[in-house]
Every structure is written in structure tokens, then in C-alpha cells.
Amino acid sequence: MPATLKDVAELAKVSITTASHALNGKKVNENTRQRVLDAAKMLHYYVNINGRNLITQKTHNLTLLVLNFRGVGDMTEDISYYYQMLKGAMLCAQKYDYSIKFETAFWADIREGDYFEQKVFGRSTDGIIVIPQYKFRCDFLKLLEDESYPFVMVNPWAEVSDMHKVYIDNFAGGKLAAQCAGRHDRILFINGPEEHISAAMIEQGFIAGLLERGIRFEEQGIVYSDYTHEGGYYAMKKVLSDNAGQPTFVFCANDYMATGVLTAAHEMGLKIPQDVSILGFDGMDVSKCVFPRLSTIDVDVSSMGYEAVSRLISLIEHPEKAAGLSPVCISPSLLVRSTTRP
């Protein structure tokens, strides 16, 4: 016969209420909590999740949604980037006994369907983390706010309250890249798609940083690509074949494009970093797996996932404190390796 909560309480020599609190993460003395956990383990007792959900009116499920347009660069193809984000998100969710469902969707499908209505009124999930890659019309925000439905926007561009914001300071990352450019005067910037939210902020920061250092930078020095290795490769090959002058510094808005630039430079017989310095962005594992090892603007993507879930759970469990919350900002850092020179 399966063990009951009463059995656990008796073995741990505590009341049933204390045993319940200890097993459900509520505040109890740490020694008492450990005694209850040990008793539960010994008796092979597990909390009845469905029963708890009926009492609390919570599913303990969260949704992480990546929104995209059809036919444009899709960051979800970058498995490493989203793996890092999910790893951080799941680490935080497990800490608070939540589960996460990862979903991707095209904006057209979201607008034509009733995706957000199902989330809000169906209560299949307690809250949602929205990651818009492009500048969408965020009609759904009114529904979420009107219904006081817990949500977080990662790298938001729409006007949302500070309590809902978790973002990477991509503008600061762009300025760090300009710092790495030093006094180079033949600079190439291979950016992501022009309308991509992060790409736009990195570009603004990079140009501002160059201007602060007295470096003139023409718009002709920007090439828009698609965040892939192939995109970086063909962008670099085209620049080198156009006889427009070989760049001495190439900054890419992600590490995958930078590895493509590295390949193209090798094929053209260029020495790195003697002939051309190359800098990536994001600090993905791929930056450590190429030769020479790639210098990059390092972003703690795992931390962003962790903080997004942490903020969402705060909005779910402590809505009365939400109004006083500040936005969460993840600051990048410059990681100099072997593809850049002073």
C-alpha cells in the first residue's frame, strides 16, 4: 500500500501540516525540511501534483514562445543559442518546481488564431515568456495586461511595464565591439536581418561607439545577412571580390556568421589576425571550436533564460509586489581570443 503524507509526518516526527509545507517548498526550519525529505525518500512518497494544482489553481507549467516571420532569418535554427537559454530557464523552473514548454510560432499564425486567448482563458499554463525576434504589432499585450496574466518579454521593443522586461544590453555590446575595433579604418560590419530587434540595437551601439572614438563609418560598411555560417561566408566573399578594399576589421552580429567570415578569409589566403581581425557576438560554444579561437562579445544567454523564468515566477506568486520591480538587464563583456589584434 502506498505511503501517505501521514506516514511521512509520523516518521519525521512532525505534524502533517509541517510535512506538507516541507514537501511543497514552503518556509520551514531547514533541519525539519531535511528530516521530512529523508522520510519521504525512505517511504517512496511523492507529492500528488494534480491534487496540489486543484488546491492552488495553478498548473506549475510555463511557456517559452519564440515569435518569428516566415521567410526571414530565424534564430531558432541556432540550436546552441536556444539550448543555452533553455538550460538556464529549466534550471530556474526546477528550483521552484515548475515545468517549461518551448514553442515557436509564426506571427501570422498567432494573429489569425487564438493562441493567447487559449493561454489566458484556458489556463493551460501559469505564465508565458515571449521572445519576439522582429518588430511585431503586439496587440496581444492588451489582452495579457487587461487579464493580469503573468508574462515576460525578452528583448522587448514594444512599450511594456518594467516588471515585464528582461533584456540583453545589445547597445552596450555594440559599443564594446567598437572598442575592440581600435583605430582600424577599414571596418566591415556583417549584421543580422535589418528588422531584427537585437540586430538593430547592436548596430546602433556599434556606430555610436565608433563615433565616440572619432572613427568615421559609412553605411556602405554594413552588410545584412541571416545569422548563419553560410550567410557570413558569402557576405565576406562578396566584399572581397567587389574590389572595394579589403577590410582589416570585421565585426559580425553573431558567432555563426563570424565563423563563416573566418572560413572565407582562410580561403582567400588572408592571415588572421595579421591581415584581418574578426569579432563575433554571443559567446556561443562554436567560438571556441574554430581556429584561431574566435574573439567575441560574450553574452550569458543561460543567465537570461534563468532571469526570465525567475521574473515570471515572481509575477505569478507575488503579484502584489510586481509594480515595484525594475527591468532585468544582462550586460555583455568583451572576450578577446586569437582572431583580433590591438
Image (tube, rainbow, N blue to C red):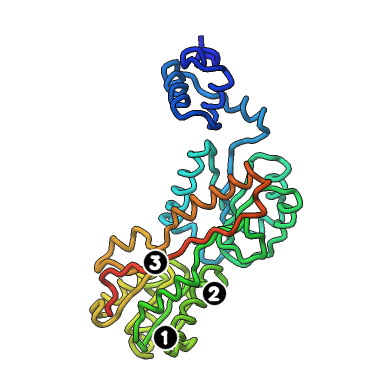
The image quadrant of residue 214 is bottom left
| Distance between the alpha carbons at the discs numbered 1 and 2 | 24 Å
Disc nearer the start of the sequence (1/2): 2
Residue named by callout 3: 333
Q: Is residue 101 visible?
A: yes
Disc nearer the start of the sequence (3/1): 1
Please, what secondary structure does the residue beneath circle 2 have? loop
| Distance between the alpha carbons at the discs numbered 3 and 1 | 19 Å
Q: Nearer the viewer, mark 3 or mark 2?
A: 3
Q: Residues within 10 Å of mark 2 (few under 14, many from 20)?
A: some
Above or below, 160 relative to 11: below
Identity of the residue furthest to the right in this view = 146
Q: Is residue 229 visible?
A: no
Residue named by callout 1: 213
Please, what secondary structure does the residue beneath circle 1 have? loop
Please, what secondary structure does the residue beneath circle 3 have? strand
- For the residues labelled 3 and 2, say whether their Cβ atoms are less than 8 Å apart: no
Left or right of 156 on screen, residue 3: left
Residue 54 appears at what percent x and percent y?
Answer: 67, 28
Left or right of 342 on screen, residue 177: right
155, 230: nearer the viewer: 155
Amino acid carrying label 1: it is Arg
- Which labelled disc corresponds to residue 194? 2
Disc nearer the start of the sequence (3/2): 2
In percent of the image, x 63 and y 60: which residue is there?
Answer: 162
Left or right of 307 on screen, residue 115: right
